[in-house]
Image (cartoon, grey):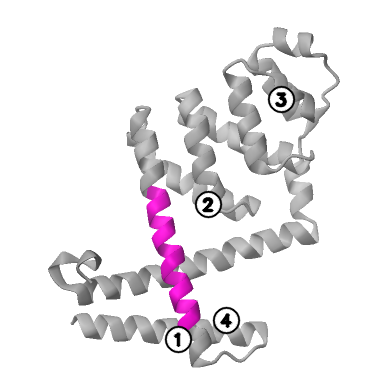
Amino acid sequence: KAFADAEKATKKLTGSVKTLGRTLGVSLSAAAVLAYGKASVKAASEDIKAQKLLANSLKNVGLAYATVDVEGFISKMQSQTGILDDQLRPAFAKLAGVTGSVAKTEKLLALAFDVSSGSSLDYSSTVDLLSQAYVGNKKALKQLDLGYTQTELAAMSFDEIQQILTERFAGSGKAALDTYIGQMDLLKVATSNASEIIGTSLLGAIDSLAGNDGIAAV
């Protein structure tokens, strides 16, 4: 049965990659299919590891109950923003660590998308800025040129700052997605997800071949 599962997974891989090749207008050799298979297994392994790390981070701040819902949110958000879950999971863990709230973290992740799209900061840097501001360190906000002095920003509550950012950068994320780069980001997410799905199938086949002890026995 294990060999049958492996053969089935291999055929699925070959078919999927060749279909992708036809879609892109290129002919893929057996070596190219094998290389894609290896890359898919690596991508799937890293994705599984990232899921476990996020689950552990949520458990450490008392949010273990929300792990499944959080993964669903991240999956939806990456498809809507073009930001890979490779970035979204660490970002979620960082913000959840300071807010202690799933709902608050989700709102801030969405806000970070608009702010990063409408400013010179990348997504990870924006998440860092928000997490620092949430705990009272508002110095980094000057990078956004909000029109307030450091003294004025220091006197504001985080909710007030969040409202200012929401109004200032509203719609920036959607506008960015309408560009060529935005569309390429969405395509990157789709191809990454496809690779992880194929890699997960291959990992399952390898695990079956390894017997009761799993991949660790190989």
Residue drawn at 57 percent across, 54 percent down: 84
Choose mark 3 or mark 2, whichever is in front.
3
- Real-space Cα separation, disc 1 to disc 3, in angstroms: 49 Å
Q: Nearer the viewer, residue 190 or 210?
A: 210
Q: Which mark is residue 86?
A: 2
Q: Which residue is mark 4?
A: 20
Q: Could you tell me residue 108's position as x and y percent?
A: 60, 32
Q: What secondary structure is found at the residue carrying circle 2?
A: helix
- Real-space Cα separation, disc 4 to disc 1, in angstroms: 10 Å
Q: Could you tell me residue 148's position as x and y percent?
A: 83, 16
- Real-space Cα separation, disc 1 to disc 2, in angstroms: 26 Å
Kind of residue at badge 2? Asp
**In the image: residue 66, left or right of residue 181:** left
Above or below — where is 115 with respect to 4?
above
Query: How many numbered discs, if any?
Result: 4
- Real-space Cα separation, disc 4 to disc 3, in angstroms: 44 Å
Q: Which mark is residue 14?
A: 1
Classify 10 Å Cα crowding around label 4: few (below 14), some (14-19), many (20 and above).
Answer: some
Q: Nearer the viewer, residue 106 or 207?
A: 207
Classify 10 Å Cα crowding around label 3: few (below 14), some (14-19), many (20 and above).
Answer: some
Res 1 → quadrant: bottom left
Q: What secondary structure is found at the residue carrying circle 1?
A: helix
Q: Which residue is mark 3?
A: 140
